[in-house]
Image (tube, rainbow, N blue to C red):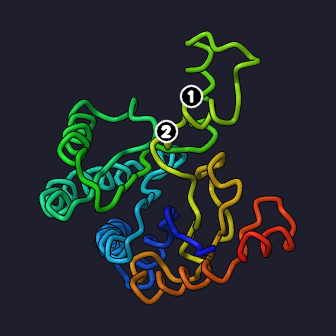
């Protein structure tokens, strides 16, 4: 049975350390990280990967210095303004996952217009995680279930998955984390149950085609068993 790569999720780590190594400001590192994100979106599209999720801003990132947080959101708005037409014309559908309640009305409006503009595109589904945390997502999901009066006996894995921010896409096949850290940092906790996880020391601004292809090749060499024995998997592959 041919293995298929439907969904790649990426923790984009290392912008600040990249900037420090170059003697530049952290915001310059984030700017170069945004360029890397644009590059990887195109690479994923070229490789016919249907779903790509990028971890752009976690719910814990508010603890960073205020000027860095403000700079990150200014960069986000500038990125959308400069790149949206090209992304739309190339068939990229953009969605944002996370809790947008802390964002300004202007930013929420910009995000909504971007999602509306690209909603019919099919070349690549790009999810951007903003003010996102896996635990927070599960809490928000639970609250929605309670608000809707769902009975305990009616709660299944499918019910929960259908209430999550990611209900519109399959769980990731491959998670890539750049920057040399070996943790998932509260990202897609429910969805990563059987995801293959690839860690690389490459800092995010330096991540490109060679590193992505190395991660994909590593994934293709993995045997995804989903709790089954190796013998069961080999039987299905015949």
Look at the image and tell me whether residue 61 can be seen.
yes
| Within-10-Å neighbours for mark 1: few <14, some 14–19, many 20+ | some
Q: Is residue 114 left or right of residue 48?
A: left
Residue sitting at 55 percent across and 75 percent down?
A: 179
Residue 53 on image: x %, y %? 45, 58
Residue 131 on image: x %, y %? 45, 43
Q: Is residue 119 left or right of residue 168?
A: left
85 or 21, nearer to the observer: 85
Residue 90 on image: x %, y %? 19, 65
Q: Quadrant of the N terminus?
A: bottom right
Of helix, strand and loop, which one carries label 1?
Answer: helix
Residue sitting at 21 percent across and 39 percent down?
A: 116
197 or 15, nearer to the observer: 197
| Within-10-Å neighbours for mark 2: few <14, some 14–19, many 20+ | many
Q: Give the label, 2 or 1, closer to the camera.
A: 2
Residue sitting at 25 percent across and 37 percent down?
A: 112
Residue lying farthest to the front in this orientation: 238
- Is there a contact, CB below 8 Å, between mark 2 and mark 1? yes
234 or 96, nearer to the observer: 234
**In this figure, which residue is indicated by the disc labeled 1?**
140
**In this figure, which residue is indicated by the disc labeled 2?**
165
Residue 181: name its quadrant: bottom right
Q: Which mark is residue 63?
A: none
Residue lying farthest to the top in this orientation: 149
């Amino acid at each position: 049975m041919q293995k298929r790569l439907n969904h790649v999720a990426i923790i984009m780590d290392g912008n600040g350390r990249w900037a420090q190594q170059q003697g530049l400001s952290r915001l310059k590192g984030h700017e170069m990280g945004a360029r890397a994100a644009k590059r990887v979106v195109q690479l994923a599209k070229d490789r016919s990967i249907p779903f790509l999720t990028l971890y752009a801003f976690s719910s814990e990132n508010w603890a960073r210095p205020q000027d860095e947080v403000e700079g990150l959101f200014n960069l986000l708005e500038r990125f959308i303004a400069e790149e949206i037409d090209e992304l739309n014309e190339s068939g990229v559908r953009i969605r944002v996952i996370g809790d947008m309640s802390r964002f300004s009305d202007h930013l929420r409006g910009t995000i909504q217009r971007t999602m509306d503009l690209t909603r019919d595109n099919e070349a690549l589904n790009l999810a951007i995680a903003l003010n996102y945390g896996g635990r927070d997502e599960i809490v928000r999901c639970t609250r929605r279930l309670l608000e809707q009066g769902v009975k305990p006996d009616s709660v299944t894995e499918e019910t929960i998955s259908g209430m999550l921010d990611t209900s519109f896409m399959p769980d990731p096949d491959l998670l890539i984390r750049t920057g040399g850290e070996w943790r998932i940092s509260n990202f897609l906790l429910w969805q990563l149950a059987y995801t293959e996880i690839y860690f690389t020391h490459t800092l995010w601004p330096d991540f490109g085609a060679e590193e992505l292809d190395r991660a994909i090749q590593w994934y293709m060499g993995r045997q995804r068993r989903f709790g089954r024995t190796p013998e069961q998997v080999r039987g299905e592959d015949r």
